[in-house]
Amino acid sequence: MRTTRYYAALVVVVLMVMTLSAVAQGPPQVDPKNPVTSYVKTRVGRQTTNIAAAADAMPAENYSFKPTDGQWTFGAIVAHIVTSNLRVCQAIGEQAPPEGLGALKAEDPKDKLVAGLKQGFDYCKAALDKVDDSKLADQVSVGQNKVARANAVLTLPIDFADHYAQMAGYLRAKNILPPSAQPRRP
């Protein structure tokens, strides 16, 4: 019973965050036959673009930067995005991730971390492309837990929003304007 309430609350929060975000960025293209998965795919596409641009924007010498002792380095955020997304996207698409991709470390050089980040995003996109709304109730394994595929699918945009917010704060601390704050080109 408690788990059901948790998932119901999670869905409500996700939908509220997605709605507020959609209002700010304009309406995404939604497939009426698959409204949930098509919406998530659109959100994830926008978020991965911003995260990759943020990773590119931070100079290599600042990948070891962390605003306070208790926070991760910028490189640790990038490495975490890759490894956590591989676990989630493996559950979504039910296929093994590319060899060696989960072995990234915070101390790896920027070029290796950014390449892994982008490869991980491609892997997640391929996993999401295999899913439609009819598969959201299927049980999948995320780590040691069995959850509805919907849990994994809805986790992606939440995780991406959280980590992009971290990255944007780090960029601003280094006087770099985050990608989403830059003027839009016509």
Image (tube, rainbow, N blue to C red):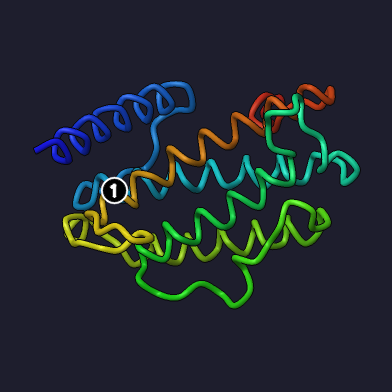
- In the displayed structure, does residue 11 sit left or right of residue 105? left
- Between 157 and 32, the residue placed more toward the observer is 157
91 above or below 16? below
**Residue 11 appears in which quarter of the rendering?**
top left
> Residue 114: x, y in percent?
73, 55
Could you tell me which secondary element the residue under label 1 belongs to? helix
- Please tell me how many numbered marks the rendered image carries: 1
The residue nearer to you, when weighing 56 against 6, is 6
Residue at (50% x, 48% y) in the render: 45
Residue 149 spot, x, y in % from top left: 26, 56
Residue 171 seen in render: no
Q: Residue furthest left?
A: 1
Look at label 1 and name its amino acid: Asn
Picture layout, residue 160 above or below residue 103? above
Whether residue 84 can be seen here:
yes
Please report the residue visible at 30 percent of the width from the left and 62 percent of the height from the top: 131
Q: Which residue is mark 1?
A: 151
Mark 1 closeness class: few <14, some 14–19, many ≥20 residues within 10 Å: many
Q: Residue furthest right?
A: 61
User: What residue sits 18% from the left and 61% below the top?
Assistant: 138
Tell me if 8 is positioned left or right of 83 in this view: left
Residue at x 84% of width, y 22% of height: 175
User: Dividing the image into 4 quarters, which one contains the C terminus?
Assistant: top right
Measured along the vertical axis of the image, is residue 70 above or below residue 77? Answer: above
Quarter placement of the N terminus: top left
Where residue 165 appears, as percent x and y from the top left, is 59, 29
